[in-house]
Amino acid sequence: MAEQWRCAGHAGDLSEDSPIEYKIEGGAEVGIYRVGDELYALENVCPHAYALLTQGFVDGDMVECPLHEAVFHIPTGKCLKEPGGRDLKTYAVRLAGEEIQIKVE
């Protein structure tokens, strides 16, 4: 399947302290974050235990899991504090006018 850009939300729904979630066809759950003027998209489920990171605590360019305090770097998905277990998958994301788009492959 060729890669495609899909609408994942609108710019007005996203702020630095309030990420949005998006579910890709096929089941992958993605969190979309704004850090400064940049958008980032990463795996939304904490690899340690099922918890949605978009319901966690955003502090600058980091997000903390709401259940067990694992911390991830939003721009890279890197696990900064255990018990995250591994880095998160990242996704290409862009703003097209007011539409947030995510690349699915």
Image (tube, rainbow, N blue to C red):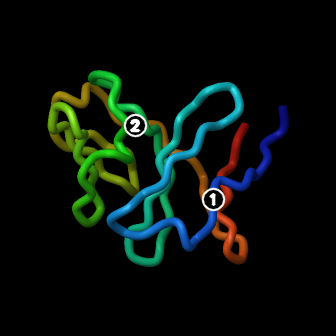
On the image, the x and y values in percent for residue 94 come to 63, 64
Nearest to the eye among marks 2 and 1: give it: 1
- Residue 66 to residue 13: above or below: above
Would you name the residue on which mark 2 appears? 88
x 48%, y 54%: residue: 20
| Residue found 46% across the figure and 38% down from its top | 43
Q: Residue at x 40, y 32 (%)?
A: 45
Position of residue 81 in the picture relative to residue 15 (left or right): left
- Above or below: residue 20 compared with residue 1: below
Residue at x-position 29% and y-position 62% = 61
Which amino acid is tagged 2? Answer: Leu
Q: Which residue bears the numbered disc 1?
A: 9
Q: Nearer the viewer, residue 95 or 55?
A: 55
Marks 2 and 1, the one that precedes in the sequence: 1
Q: Quadrant of the N terminus?
A: top right
To which quarter of the image does residue 55 belong?
top left
SS assignment at label 1 = strand
Q: In the rendered view of the protein, which quadrant contains the C terminus? A: top right
Placement of 83 over or under 89, stated as above or below: above
Left or right? Give the position of 5 relative to 43: right
Q: Residues within 10 Å of mark 1 (few under 14, many from 20)?
A: some
Inter-mark Cα distance, 2 to 1: 21 Å
In contact (CB < 8 Å): disc 2 and disc 1? no
Using residue 27 as the reference point, say whether residue 68 is left or right of it: left
Type of amino acid under label 1: Gly
**How far across and how far down the image is residue 79, in percent?**
26, 39
Q: Where residue 91 sits in the image (x, y, percent)?
A: 56, 46
The residue tagged with tag 2: helix, strand or loop? Answer: loop
Q: How many marks?
A: 2
